[in-house]
Amino acid sequence: MNRLTCGLLLAMMPLLAQAATPEEWQTWQADTPAFQSRVEQSRWLPEAETRVHADGELLYTPTQSLAWQWVTPQPRIVALDMTGQFVELTPDVPELSVVPLSETDDGLPEERQVIRLLFQLMQGNLSALRERYHLLLDGEREDWQLILLPRDRSEGALKKVAVEGGRFIESLQFVSAQDNELSLTLSDPQPPVEARGAQLLAESLTTDTIDSTDTTMQGDDSPDHSASAGPAASDD
């Protein structure tokens, strides 16, 4: 009996230990519906002993685009559509001008590279991912981890990208050759109020910018209106 039991367990071990395949993961990702969520970005620079944050909202529509609206450190929208084209909108508010995180020289990917990779991951685009990375997948549908090891092993190349998720992607972590880290966290996924992707975010930011500009202009013009009202009253 013991020998039979051991034999059955040994026979079942390969099945129990069998991990999900990238093709299965691709199917999971292809089923990701349109959603919006909070998004936070954090860059850790050990040499400078500082951490740089950005925070906002992300909106994904499988047949349209991936867009995020940053609230801090500067209000702006960056979107990637299905054709591979980027659209960026930043309100012209001088006092809010901040050096973009993409301009830091830390060996980490630029913002547009992060967006493009995230879009490929959400779509489960294995062919695009395999062009640049070796893939190591572990876990199951509701709890998985994907390690991307860049095929480019030259000096200064990115060391690795770790992606974790379940029903939705939850986090990405990029590690540079200098051990600088870029973390992207997605939380509280919800069905979108309207599935218009970047268009909705762009309209929202444009409206906020116009309202802000109009308020400023009205404040600047109010003394002129009062000055012109005086002579008009005396003529009557």
Image: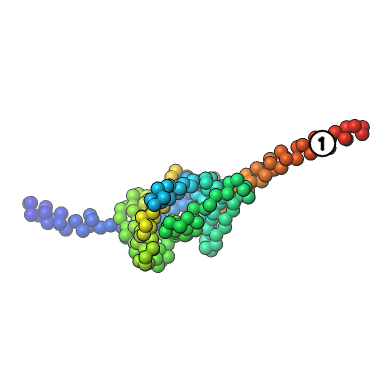
Q: Is residue 134 above or below residue 49?
A: below
Q: Which residue is mark 1?
A: 227
Note whether residue 217 is visible: yes
Q: Residue at x 33, y 53 (%)?
A: 145
- In the figure, is residue 18 to the left or right of 194? left
Q: Position of residue 107 (x, y in %)?
A: 42, 59
Relative side of 68 to 176, left or right = right
- Which one is nearer the viewer's eye here, 102 or 29? 102
Q: Residue at x 55, y 47 (%)?
A: 74
Figure quadrant of residue 188: top left
For the point 42% across and 65% down, the residue is: 128
The image shows residue 79 at horizontal and vertical percentages of 54, 55
Q: Is residue 62 visible?
A: no
Residue at 80%, 35% (x, y): give it: 226
Q: Secondary structure at mark 1?
A: helix
| Amino acid beneath label 1 | Ala
Quadrant showing the C terminus: top right
Query: Which sits in the foreground, 83 or 233?
Result: 233
- The picture places residue 88, in percent across and down from the top left corner, at 57, 55
Judge from the rendering whether residue 151 lies leftward or rightward of residue 111; answer left or right: left
Furthest residue toward front: 48
Residue 206, above or below 84: above
Say few, some or many: other residues with alpha carbon within 10 Å of mark 1 (under 14 / 14 to 19 / 20 or more). Answer: few
